[in-house]
Amino acid sequence: MNTLQERSISEGKYRMFVICAILFYLPLAFNVIEFKGKPVDIAASDIIVLFLLLIYGYMYWQKKVNRRESQYLLLLVVAVTFFLFLAFFGYGESGGMMPILSAIKFEKVFLALIAGMCFSRFCDFNNFWRISSIAALLILLSLYISQLLISGSFSTRWGATAFGYPVYGFPNSSASYYILFVMFAVIACIRGLNRYAYAGLAFLSAVFMVMSYSRSALVILIFFLLLILFYLPVKKIIIGLIAMLPAVLIFCVTLLAASSQSVINDSRSASLNFEARANQTFYSSKPFGGRIEIALETISLVEKKPFFGYKFESFSNYNSVFDTPHNQYLEILFKSGLFGFLLYFGVLVFFLFIVLKKTYSPGVSIMDRRSVVCFLLALLSLMLGNLAQPNFTFTQTGNVSFFILGFLLMTDMTKFNSATNKSNE
């Protein structure tokens, strides 16, 4: 699929999708208001999700949505309504707007899933991965250039700003988010796109995750790479590693050229930073930054209100130090109780099962199957990381992950299974 004719969409539409993908995947957000000292941010991905929801709503009004889509939409609407009702009860009990704002941020992932379902009407399976990979490559290159120009040192935490604008969720949330960029790079290589460029993207994304000094991001990266090593054929992995060598060389040259300090000093500072994180992990009295203590406190709180939780009250009302349990699963239990937990993950597991079933249905090529499984492995890695931080509540990770899931739920994976696909198997 190297020509516009083979892409099945016009040149203008293709370029528009690339621009929209850059905005959607860009980890930047803008502060709209502050409520009780807490910022309310809106990312570009939120705006794109809202736009697609309006389009899908019009299509539904025009009865252009089939029965299967209607059933999925009904399930998602039930989930969104349940959490909103809980929030309104919380509003009645607390007398403040915080429960409603918290619920909206919490359940945005379901709206992103619907937006992904809508987008499958306009973009085919092959172009989705191509466009996403291009957008991820351009974003990471811009972040890397920004890192070199602003800091001039490779010992500081990477990814704090993008040309002067603060990166949303820095450091831990944004660092974990980059696992999706590693995923896009691996999928691009699987699909036979420019291996040198996208092997470089995988390497650079991994560097950003490591150099953020985020332990949770490092665990996510290592787990994902191990899963990929076990899943992909050895031949594919060796080809990818060889293709990565030019990117590693360019990376080293540009990094050394941009270093404002001596290379020895930068290396020593980076080594000390890693050593400090290792000492905190293995020798500190609180190796997990107090997360175990927070988890135990959250569990004790949930035991008092097990079924509907605290109806999206702020966790800081019960903890003077932290405003979140730093655990996606405990956060859901705290905010919405056991019923909310079962509904949230029941919906997620249900749709994951459908996508997995589609992926292994007859007519899906090995290349396409590997692409989807690669996404599922990245999602599984994020779910492991959810034990240390609420990745899905972070706007970018939640929006992108569930958007892709919604897209895969409705897209036709067999439409372009031609000799081109088979040649990549």
Image: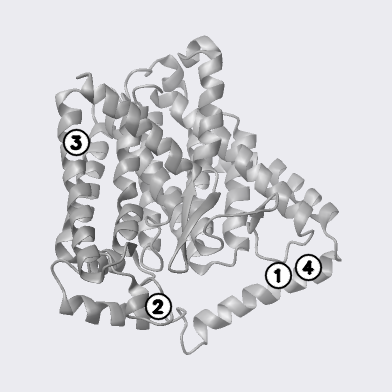
Camera-side mark, 2 or 4: 2
Where the C terminus falls, by quadrant?
top left
Secondary element at image label 4: helix
Q: Quadrant of residue 125?
A: top left
Q: How far apart are labels 4 and 1 at the CA level?
A: 6 Å
User: Mark 2 or mark 1: which comes first in sequence?
Assistant: 1
Secondary element at image label 2: helix
Camera-side mark, 1 or 3: 3
**Residue visible at 45% across and 78% down in the picture:** 288
Residue hosting label 4: 266
Q: Taking 137 as reference, is 170 above or below it? A: below
> Dot 2, crowdedness within 10 Å: few (<14), some or many (≥20)?
some
Residue 1 appears anywhere in the view: no
Residue hosting label 2: 291
Residue 161 appears anywhere in the view: yes
x, y (%) of residue 379?
Answer: 37, 50
Q: Quadrant of residue 268?
A: bottom right
Residue hosting label 3: 72
Q: Amino acid at mark 4?
A: Asp
User: Mark 1 or mark 3: which comes first in sequence?
Assistant: 3
Q: Are marks 1 and 3 in contact (CB under 8 Å)?
A: no
Question: In the shown orientation, is residue 312 left or right of residue 381?
Answer: left
Q: Are marks 3 and 4 in contact (CB under 8 Å)?
A: no
Camera-side mark, 2 or 3: 3
Residue hosting label 1: 270
Front residue of 37 and 327: 37
